[in-house]
Amino acid sequence: MTDLLTPTRGTQAIYRINPVAKLGAAFLLGTCLILSIDWVSASVALVLECVLFLFAGLSPRRFWLRTLPVWVAAPLTAVTIALYGQTSGEVYFEFLFARISEGSLELALATLLRVLAIGLPSIVLFLTVDPTDLADGLAQVLHLPARFVLGALAALRLVGLFIDDWRSLELARRARGVGDSGRVRRIAGQAFALLVLSIRRGSKLATAMEARAFGAPVTRTWARESRFGAGDWALIGLGALIGAAAITASVITGSWNFIGT
Amino acid sequence: MAALAGVLGGGEEGEATGELLLDGVSPARSRGRVGLVLQDPDSQVILARVGDDVAFGCENLGVPRNEIWSRVFSALEAVGLDVSLDHPTSQLSGGQKQRLALAGVLAMQPGLLLLDEPTANLDAAGITEVQDAVARVAETSGATLVVVEHRVDVWLPLVDRVIVLAAGGGVLADGTPTDVLAQQGRHLATQGVWVPGFAPQRPNRIRAHGGGQLLAAESLGIGRSNILRDSLSISVSAGEAVAVTGPNGAGKSTLGLTLAGLLPPCSGAVVARAELARGLAPHPIRWKSRDLLTRIGTVFQDPEHQFLSSTVRAELEIGPRALRLPEAGIVPIIDNLLSRLRLDHLAEANPFTLSGGEKRRLSVATVLATAPQILVLDEPTFGQDSRTWTELVALLATLIDDGSAVVAITHDADFVAALADREFAL
């Protein structure tokens, strides 16, 4: 939890990039890639991204560890689509509702690459985002309402306390003699108890924030300035560039299929 | 207190009569003039880094950026919090968190400082830290200080005036500490306030040793995801009280939970002797939840974690019912506990709505309902008034002398002196 709220600050350029720029780059890239389902655009994007991952400010170990969910999810999605995706061309295998065909295999490959091409950069970019910096950026650069941004940021800190609460609730149920059976019902009860505790913690936090003049009728200042400079525009540009390159390659090779057509 | 700080809810959250003015205006409209520090250290930390957290109030008041940081530095210095601005707030101790809250308030440069039992949830070292910080702040800032407290001795050297509020409303006494305590001291002490010179009565322990060993651990390693401590050796015998003491983070609670059969040991083993196991396997962590009830009972530090029902009576019935005791046998057990722990008038109340002292008594009662041979208590006297303290200590003394074993994790030196046969310092 500590790691999530106050990630280590590195010296690489990526740590100086405004989180809003990372958000923008990931968003642009993602939008370009969901417009079509073909393997050319996804693999072009993925290849270009792989070069950039070298500058992502992550150790190889951390990279693999944190992107593991994507590496697991992508093949699973592909297998599902290979089995149940739209049938076309030659049919290789058939069993009940499952039908592997030339078309479904191609679709599966395209999806596998796409999940990786969208998932990996998003995770990699956000691993180096400090929630506090993100909040500063959202409020100062994008001018989202400070009340909501800071409220959400402060609430994020409570997540760690909820995890501790949950563990204690679990142990307490064993201690009270009701930990042997009825697991589903017990977890429901435990979830309700956690809800009660979290509402209480939330309202205490709100009081503490209000006591520190949160929501005072004056224009709020910011102790940390959120700058948006050339480097940030460059990252957004990179995101757009990769997206454009992927689309261009796909259109030239004739594999572009606009989603829904 | 909340009204003075301007954080009292509006008309929909209660009724207000009369008028409260701060510098001639309503407190809600003069934000930042009043700084409030509350009881619970965990719920007052707002941001993830120390510097940002202190700066939060200034930002809200619209203080210019360069001035904010100079205020942050002087506030941190005033409370003696010597950590870097980037230090994660989650890694601070209770006493440090309270000093952080004080610094955050100080940075707003208030004219009035309100402290609501700021040391109630702290250990002895934490109390001293906060005491010193407040004393220094009161001297240097020139702000008015109002502190609400039921442990009078903590602030006695610092305050110029003591006000005693009457239970039904109104002011009972108002004057210099010496006068007020001379006049109201005895009355306050009977109401549960900790007044110097009126120490609560300690029970007479019979201390008849000779009970057999119930539980033992050799070269025990404890921890949750990583090992916190290892090579611990501890044993518990019938009819004795063991106090587990040590600084914050030393693993006292983890040791308690491990001995109680709730957390698996990281290394070594907790072994129940035949007298306790009564036919079960020797490792409590392997026992069923129901089997723990009559063998090892645990009272958690936060009573709310162990409440499961919507009424006090139903809460007490859970243990006996899990043991499948006959219905006719349950009622007398519960009635007896309710009256022994002064909870009879609350039998139909919701446990979550009780006062701190009542919650503590109920959490102890739920465990006693199944008469376990060993009682593991985590900070049983934390934040309790002197009346609950006295009752709790007397009750435990009777249980121990009747042959129960008690393992108490505690910071409370008085509690150790009153009850413990042995102290196990971590």
Image (spheres, coloured by chain):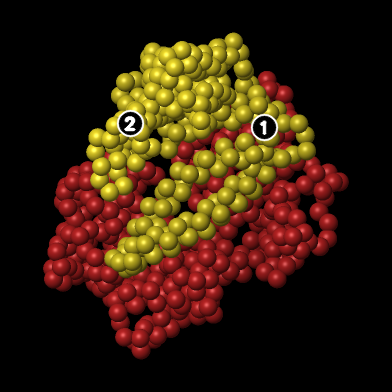
Q: Which chain is yellow?
A: A
Identity of the residue drawn at 51% across and 44% down: A158
Whether callout 1 and callout 2 share a subunit is answered: yes
Q: Left or right: A37 with respect to B153?
A: left
- Expressed as whole percent of the image width and height from the top left, the position of residue B100 reads 56, 37
Q: Is residue A174 above or below residue A128?
A: below
**Precedes in sequence: disc 1 or disc 2:** 2
- What element does badge 1 sit on? loop
- Expressed as whole percent of the image width and height from the top left, the position of residue B82 reads 50, 29
Residue in front for this viewpoint, B359 or A99: A99
Q: Is residue B294 above or below residue B90?
A: below
Q: Which amino acid type is shown beneath numbered disc 1?
A: Leu
Q: Which chain is red?
A: B
Q: Left or right: B53 with respect to B261?
A: right
- Residue on which the image places disc 1: A144
Q: Which amino acid type is shown beneath numbered disc 2?
A: Gly
Identity of the residue drawn at 35% across and 24% down: A63
Residue A89 - label? 2
